[in-house]
Amino acid sequence: MVAHGAQTGLIPLVTIIACLVLALGHSSLRAQDGPMTALERLQAGQAAYSKRDYAAALEQFEQFLADFGDSEEAAAAVASVKPLVAICLIRTRAFDAARASISEALTIAEIDRSIKLELLFWKGVCELQASAHAEAQVTFGTYFKEAPPHDPRRWEAAVLFGTGYTLQEQYPEAIAFFDARVNEADSQGMHEVSARLMTLQLHALLQTEQFDDALALTLRASERFEQFVQIIGLQSLILELGSRLLDAERHYEAIRCLHYVWPHERLLSLQQSRTEKLQKRIRTLKARGQADALVFQLDGILTRITREVEHFSKVEDYDAAVRMRLARAYLGLQRYREAGLIMESMLGEMETTPIVESASVTLIQCWLQESHWERAVSAADLYLQRFGDEAPSAATVLFMKGQAWQSARRYEEALAVFETCLSQYAKSPMTPNAAFMRGICHLQLEHYPEAIAIFREVPIAYPKANSLAESARYWEGMAHSFASDHQQCLEIMRAYLKAYPEGYYHADAAFRVGFSLHALADYDNAIATLRTFVRDNASSAYVDEARLLLGDGHLALGELEPGMAAYAQISTESVKFYEEGAFKTGKALRMSERFDEMRKHFEGFIDNQTDSARLPKALHWLAWLQQREGNLDGARESYWEAIDAHGDDSSKPTVLDLIIGLEKLYTGDDRENLASAWADRRAKALKDEQATLAVRALWAHARVLQRTQPIQATVMMTEMVPELNPEQHSARLLVDAAVALERMDAPARASDVFRDLVKWHPLALERDRAEIGLAREAMRKEDYTAALGHFEYVESRGSGTVRLGEILLDKAHCQEALGDREAALSTLEALLAEKAISAEAKAKALMQCGRWLAEADDEKKALVYFERVYLVYGRDTALVATAYWSRGQLLEQLGEREKARELYHEMVSREELREHPEYALAQQRLQS
Amino acid sequence: MKSAVAIITCWLIGATMADEVLHLHSGDALPGKIEKIDNTHVHFKVIIDGPRGRGEARRRVARKDIAFIDFAGPDKALDNHAREQWLAHKKFLGIANSPAGDHGLAYVSELMAAGKGTEALRLANEIAEGDWDADRRDRAIRWRLKALASIGRETEAKGEAEKLLQSTTDPEVMVEAHLILGQAAFASLRELVEAHPRWMDEDTVRPERDALYHAAIDHFLFGSLFHGSQRQAASEGLWQACQVHRHANDRQRARDTAQDLLSLYPTSALTPQAQAFLSQTDPAS
């Protein structure tokens, strides 16, 4: 880079020397024969120099010195030629000779100052070439001091001075030097030089592992990347810093650093565009002239960029390496999503190199870690698509895809993937795992025989996979257990315990032995086994289930005390088992007629399990005990106490069950007392600002009145609406209020409540009723598409809480309204095929089908439908009359007058149809 | 009153315009002062240093012959007056080397800060279409997206952002486009959760909610993951990702993201907010 700059710098020197030579006054003509004259030599040397033929020039100049070096007459010319010789030696890369030559030239007393500076600079370069770094530093230091401030090489000398420290591995000195000079260079407008000083400083900081300072310098540099002509060099150092920080597990710092590493293409295109701009600028400046110094600077920059681009364009996998480091840093921080996103971009965008291949495998692991199952599957598919089935990790990737599907509970898909893995990669280390996982998938799909077959086959097919053999044995036993083949399960689990006394599934297998014995009604052995299990495996997830089974076993043998003792051991944290045990204890006490103990037992349950969904059931047993003793008031009081205690707690929806349970204790005239008791409770709750209890009391009051005063009950239900908080209050209250609003002919308000119900209680059984309400509101507004959406949702839920027949009739109506009669007809056909649907709905469906078929000129089929109405579903006389009449009319249309008359006769013979208008019409037809 | 302002502005422009140098494709350079510019020509007052002193001549140079112009630096008198700088330079917007677009974008920034999104949008459009510099056109497009979102045209902003991502490779534009898309996804997510507060119980809603949640996070993280040097936009994305996690009641991830923001962009304007959030959500609590 420096050499290039010198070329332009030599132009004035040559001119000066040439002038000196010409001043000798000798003839410019060379003799044709014989030795050349001094002038001829000089002219020949000058000519060669001008043509940049430095070897020829050197030859001429050296010959001149050899011939006339001692001549006093030529002393001035000799003094002028010596510096040229030094330059020619540099140009021909004879640095050692140049160094000596320059030293000699510099001893010339009358040497021009500018020539002296020129040679001084080159002396430093030669010393650097000769690894005389300290001497070079002295030379460049002298140059820096002696050169005028505007000398463009002055700062080059400074850079080379600092480089001297680096070359001598005197990094602390280098850092201090660069640190001091950066600001100075900037203050003199030498931003490009300052940028180079920063780059060298970063190198020195890296060498001394001063990572914090290096990072700070990187961040400072990032503010002025545009001034870094050799940006690629700087970026390479930043990448190295990032890598070193990563190795030191300083992940955040590594990321901050790697943020500033640009992509390969961006760096290349920046440098190429800089090259073009510089070339253009230099051309323009040269054309204008008078800008030699600037051209010198720009030429140097251009050379440096060109070299950097040449080298960098050959670097492979640069971007992949950078991204992989970034991803690794995020992995180090356990940010799997972030790492996954980075590697996902690699897989999607980059060439299929080994780095990208490896990253893609990690990518799938990241998505598995993040539970992004479908994303893991997509990544695996893309891997196989891009790298092919023969890629190094193809089997592993396929296995992970199966795992992803399995975790997503898509067992069929998982099974298919594991099967493929097994068939495609028979020799892969993943194959035994894939074979085993097929069994697990079958197990989860409840394909027990298939699962068992696989679990048996795995240890035989893969005898070296010891841990798989153990797992396969255990899961084979479990498959038998799930298939209720307890004897087989027992044998396998016993064999497992024997074969693997320290096995991974040891505790689980021990429990399963007790479970199987219990299932086989071998209670004595089950009790012994389960007792040992409970004693030895207190921390097992199965321990409370074992206690429950232990209790059941004792009770089955009529051993109440040990049975109840076992139930009492169940932890309250195992809610399901605990409650099951508690109610079984209650039952045991009831059966043994230990009623006092039973009362205390359930009182204890109510006191301790206030959040239990089975609280009403416990209260029911307390009430049963009171009633049994003829103490109805006491039974009621138990309920009232519980309602008073929990009635205002909106998080306890079971209070509504208490209200319903209480209702059953009031019959006949007592129901009026209950109604007024609820009115009192509501008044008190309102006074005490117990909003939830107040609204529940209103609901309870309305329920009591439903049979005797239905209108008032409906009004009371609607009165709940302003007090209801849909987010907190149960769906039951909301649906009752909305249905009451429908009855009060306020469908819009009802829909608002239904919408709230759907919004806040999407899983509630009452949602179906709300969806139907919303569908009917949509039908009223003739928005049949919306209505269909609601109906289809209810149909898909299949909860059985609403009448499917009515829904399908309405659905068909919507389809018809939307112009899709074909769909409407198939909906009605589906209705007719459904066994659980009421006869009334089926009759209506038949009638509707008949009408549509008649309209569609399919009269024969329509006749059959009308006939089926009065043959099969005769209870609805209005519909029967209509069916008769419609069929008769259709027969007449078809010209079958006699058949029509026979039909009308049959119709009028049925007295129960007389009240319907079609009856009179049929009589008229018979008379006509 | 308006015309008086215009006159003063014109006078200011005339009085403060310094010398320029026209660089022609031929390599010639003409120092002088631009007097007028139209679609085909630049009318130029050339300074001639003759033997009898400095003189002036008027020349009309075809725009196609001009390589670039060394424009006079920004007028110090107009420092901190982005609008005036823009008005003074806008006529040079399409000419190579012109700083007009920079002044225009500074003015766009001021308009946005003042909540004048519609005006900002108009100006950003003008620069995006007319600036000679491709980078600046891209920056103008970024402002255009922001302006669209600020005036409630989110759907349009989203559509444009999606379109832009198909074509641009400019990091700033890409990050901005992802921020716009993240905001759109987050807005849809909020709307959906508002309508379905128990979305986790709804099989038909949950996949849509999850898709919006992941889309919002992915878009917001784009800046910090792929163009982390875009400090402002990247830290904004991290903060927004933190908000998405908070909205999803995922306190741990919200804390992690806030910590990322603090560790990766310690000098970000959002640092105090992230610090406050972390101190409010003590992991021990």
Image: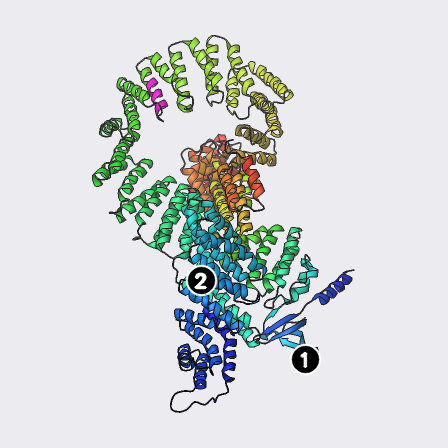
Whether residue A85 is visible here, answered yes or no, is yes
Reading the image, the residue beneath label 2 is A135
Magenta region's main secondary structure? helix
Quadrant of residue A712 within the rendered picture:
top right
Q: Position of residue A122 (x, y in %)?
A: 46, 68
Front-most of residues A791 and A376 = A376
The quadrant the N terminus of chain B occupies is bottom right
Is-magenta flag for residue A759? no
Front-most of residues A237 and A492 = A237
Which residue is depicted at the point 26% across and 42% down? A432
Type of the residue with mark 1? Gly
Secondary structure found at label 1: strand
Q: Are marks 2 and 1 on the same chain?
A: no
Counting labels gives 2
Front-most of residues A451 and A511 = A511
Which residue is depicted at the point 57% across and 76% down? A288
Residue range highlighted in magenta: A540-551
Type of the residue with mark 2? Glu
In the image: residue B75, left or right of residue A271:
right
Q: Determine the chain carrying the residue at label 2.
A: A
Taking A526 as reference, is A905 above or below it? below
Reading the image, the residue beneath label 1 is B50
Q: Position of residue A901 (x, y in %)?
A: 46, 40
Q: Position of residue A832 (x, y in %)?
A: 42, 38
Dot 2 surroundings within 10 Å: few (below 14), some, or many (20 or more)? some
